[in-house]
Amino acid sequence: MEAILKNEIKKNVSGKSVHELDSLFKPKAIAIIGASSKELSIGNVILKNLVHYGYTGKIYPINPKEPEVRGIKAYPTIFDVPGDIDLAHVIIPGKFVPQIIEDCGKRGIKSVIINSAGFSEMGEEGMALQTAFLTNAKKYGVRIFGPNCQGIINADPQYKAYCDFTFTFPKPGSISIVALSGGVGAFIMQSLFDLEIGMRMYASNGNACDVSISEVVNYYGEDEGTKAVILYTEGFHNPKEFMDVAQIVSKKKPILAMKAGRTEEGAKAAASHTGSLAGVDIATELIFEKTGILTFNNEEEMCQAAMAFSTQPIPKGNRVGIITNTGGPAVIATDELVSAGLQLPALSEKAKNILKETMLPEATIGNPIDVVATGGGKHFRSALDVLMDEETIDSVYINFVTAPFTDTDDVARNIVEVNKQNRKPIVCNFMTNMSLERFQVTAKILKDGGVPCYSFPTTAAKALGALYQYHQVQSRNIGEAKNFSDTNKAGAEKILEQAKNENREFLSSAATYQLLSHYNIPVADWRIAADANSAIQAAEEIGFPVVIKADAESLVHKSDMGGVAVNLKNADEIHATVERMKKSFDSKDLKFFVQKFLPGGRELIAGVSAKKDLGHLIMFGIGGIYVEVLKDVVFKISPVTEVEAKEMLSSIKTSKLLDGVRGEKGIHKHSVIEIIQRLSQLVTDFPEIQEMDLNPIMAFENKALVVDARIRI
Ligand code: ADP
Ligand code: MG
């Protein structure tokens, strides 16, 4: 039942019309079921908040005992309310909720915020209640927000809908927030408020049993008044749906999120490298990366960036011009800007000639432009005008210290005038003593003029870095995943079927290498031998020198136990090796895997790890037996496109090694890029593959071949 319901809801979410949520975010009349005269109750606070914030629609308190609540006429039931109702708050004990939702459906109410707790978060009994009210909601097409949630806010002066019990009353703006956790959502809202950044909409949906984070993000994406979205979530009920939505919305407007926490403790002990190298929350991080969501190290950086996004245009490139009236902070800013990927180009002759005329004699004409502490409004203005006209400059960073011997208000007014032109993004590191009234005035001019002001050079530079990062999101195109047509899917299917019939967890070596070959993933020539004589024959067919590996289902890391012998040059060496291995491994199924010896390659790893509801994570990095020590690996979510595969090669820490250092030859990157894509296609075709390690892939100047592989189904 629950599964069917969930599926129904998913379908509804993906195939929905955005306007379905208008009744939630733009209600014209709200009923508060459970409105209460008790000061310290949710049913009272919500009513108070709606009135206090200046809700423009009708409010209907529902209370069977009171004729009025907080001075507003109350009704015993929703059926007694005279007019239409778009939205209802439900603040009554859980056991009454299924019936109330039925009533809401009958009454034609389109959206319900269930603030009450006591549902799926409370175990089986609560889950049953949740299922019951959802069934009723589905029957009438009522959309449920929550339960166990705060609610929504729409700060648009047309609505001023404060359907929430929190205590921050934001001024209207362009940043919209969606947070699964009400606690986090509320403090982000408060942080924006403290930074004097306006807010557009707010949503915190608790158990999120119907209206999902994805749906809200989609709604914000369509909302013209929303310039940027702040997202907080600890994971996704339906990651695929979220990715579809986020991919589209992030091209239209920036989505800001916090980096998902990743702890060692969370990393499951797994039989494969890929499984253990992929921490628990890495999937969330990869979802953000793949869909172009900007991630921040902490909530403070995120809110600071939101301030820039709320007023500034997106830069067209990474070239920044700095204006400063003090030396040191420009140095700090430069470091931070450069590490965010920005550059400081030299100024053109034309620009320098203008500045020579307009600047004080002590000024430094270059990038940064140091207008010096005695520089006033007209000096800042000229520097700004020059940078706005300069074709090689995409954004402007300002250090503005309020030198007491200058007319700081005039400086601020000039910055504001240029900012209002909205030609290129500006951020301002405003260094002052805010306890002095004089400088409060200057600050207010800047803030009212929409100039994002920061109190540290690093913070301002980081915010500008975020604007540039979003430029990259908009211009990045990862393309479609390639579908190689030379693969043998039917052959691969047969191998997997057989392994399933044999109840195997890991594929045998033979099956593993055959499977790879069906997807044209190149492998070193190999045979399987039962004894020394057939191993010698196999080696003769392959050509000496060879490698012999002890082969049994129970053997995981063969070389740890002396199960790998390399560079065997003749029959005698093979004989001795086989006899030795027979003594050290007493597995009944022991065989000898004979393989071409491929010396001198660079050892790489590619791997796969299945993630529930998401697909597979694909890993690439430096391989060999030290992989877990070096941990120089990167991940992507399948299907991996060619662009992404290339990014994987270039984003490992030691990517320079792949090009060859100190006269060494580089590797044939194209082969590796293709292996990654073929691997991605293989696991996309066969979701039952749980884990896979190709370690190592031996990469040479002209080719790359897999010499060790393991597949778990
Ligand atoms: P395991 O990972 O189970 O210990 P591998 O098959 O990966 O076993 O072998 C361990 C190491 O032996 C590899 O990292 C590589 O250095 C070397 N090796 C294995 N096979 C070959 C081969 N065909 N040619 C060259 N070196 C090899
Ligand atoms: Mg190995």
Image (cartoon, rainbow, N blue to C red):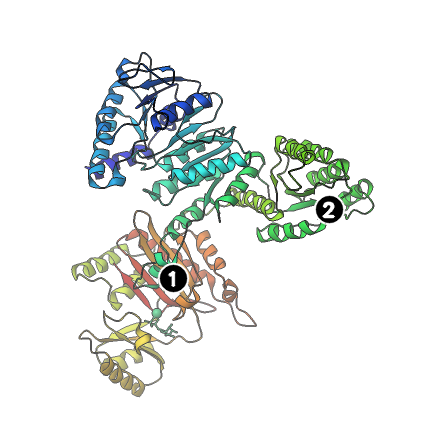
How far across and down, in percent of the image, does residue 476 sit? 50, 46
Q: Residues within 10 Å of mark 2 (few under 14, many from 20)?
A: many
Between 579 and 385, the one lying in front of the other is 385
Label 1's element? strand
Q: Is residue 485 visible?
A: no
Name the disc covering residue 606, or none. Answer: 1
How far across and down, in percent of the image, does residue 181 sit? 38, 40
Q: Is residue 473 left or right of residue 603?
A: right
How far across and down, in percent of the image, does residue 680 sit? 36, 54
Q: Quadrant of ligand 1?
A: bottom left
Image quarter in which the C terminus is found: bottom left
How far across and down, in percent of the image, does residue 136 sit? 22, 27
Q: Residues within 10 Å of mark 1 (few under 14, many from 20)?
A: many
Residue 650 against residue 592 in the figure, above or below: above
Q: Is residue 515 left or right of residue 39?
A: left
Identify the residue under disc 2.
369
Total numbered labels placed on residues in the image? 2
Query: Which quarter of the picture shows residue 577?
Result: bottom left
Between 672 and 584, the one lying in front of the other is 584
